[in-house]
Image (cartoon, rainbow, N blue to C red):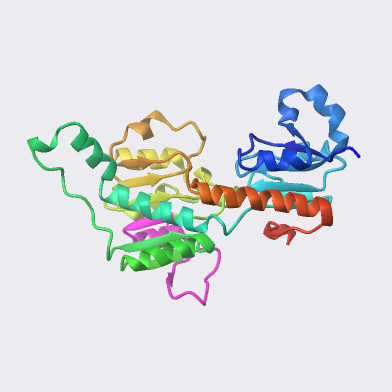
Amino acid sequence: MSQIEILSAAKLSPLLEPQVRAHYTLHDRLHESDPAAFAKIAPHIRGIAAHGESKVPAELIAQLPALEIISVFGVGYDGVDVAAAKARNIMVTHTPNVLNDDVADLAMGLMLAAARQLPAADRFVKAGQWPQGPMPLARKVSGARLGIVGIGRIGQAIAQRAAAFNMSIAYTARSQRAELPFAYYPNPTELAKVSDYLVVITPGGAATRKLINAEVLQALGQKGILVNVARGSVIDEAALIDALEKGVIGGAGLDVFENEPNVPETLRALPHVVLAPHIGSATQQTRQAMADLAFNNLHGFLSSKKVITPVPECA
């Protein structure tokens, strides 16, 4: 019996690809590399393996009449047209929960690195500047005011870590969570006004595009530090660069960007910004857990119509 045909919508993780190839015939981005060959195989594709930044638009879904499942390696899935998938009863899954700790750890790491100027301190010592005098004083994190934009699983994990730093914690979200002991503010601007550090961990997509704009940054203020471990689209990147250049805010720690992997030169040149190449979940243990979950969702649905972590719209 011939193997089930699977299309990859992006370069798959080396932890996921072997699992897929061991059970299925995998066509690696064939829709991009060879449209003619893709047209021949498209009627037989039953699954798509994707990652969090993959584009799976309605146009691609429409070309796959046998498609049953889209399995996303990642918690975000804003590049997938879920409405188009649901219209045809196509299951969409992702890999939440297993990466909560890593993303929360990185949020705290970026906050500390930006506040205490750790990259600059490293360069200062390596450049032999220490004998000429001390570095400028940095900012304290313990006991400061933390605002969290988005209070889902990862947002709550960040709050848990911040509590150990004796930070006062507040949040904004689509609605107030009565079970949480933190102060609630109705929008990011009001939250920024009462925050020393503003951490963004809200889903991407049209509803949150440029949610953090010039008004929010102005409210955060000259000593405020912005941390983004969500999606690059959530921040108005041009407004952020302008605010950093003019001293509207005090600094930033960024793991995600508007046009990854291309980061504006002006942003890369700013001394009071800490940048990371979208490594929120990038530990061996977590990426293996994500790969296993993505594969088990794909395999489970194709073999028994069962999945572990459907996206909320398909639950």
Q: Is residue 262 left or right of residue 25?
A: left
Residue 39 x, y percent position in the rendering: 84, 28
Q: Dividing the picture into quarters, in which one does residue 31 lie?
A: top right
Q: Is residue 303 left or right of residue 163?
A: right
Q: State the residue in front, 199 or 173.
A: 199
Q: Specify whether residue 62 is in view.
A: yes
Residue 190 drawn in magenta? yes
User: Which residue shows up at 48% across the image and 42% down it?
Assistant: 278
Residue 90 x, y percent position in the rendering: 80, 50
User: Which residue shows up at 59% across the image and 52% down it?
Assistant: 289
Residue 109 x, y percent position in the rendering: 36, 51
Q: State the residue in front, 100 or 275.
A: 100
User: Which residue shows up at 47% across the image and 44% down it?
Assistant: 279
Q: Residue 249, relative to residue 238: is it above or below?
A: below
User: Which residue shows up at 77% across the image and 54% down it?
Assistant: 300
Q: Residue 40, relative to residue 216: is it above or below?
A: above
**Residue that sits furthest to the right in the current view:** 1
Residue 313 x, y percent position in the rendering: 71, 58
Q: Residue 247, relative to residue 170: is it above or below?
A: above
Region in magenta: 173-199
Q: Specify whether residue 89 is in view.
A: no
**Residue that sits furthest to the left in the current view:** 132
* Image quarter in which the N terminus is found: top right
Q: Is residue 264 left or right of residue 87?
A: left
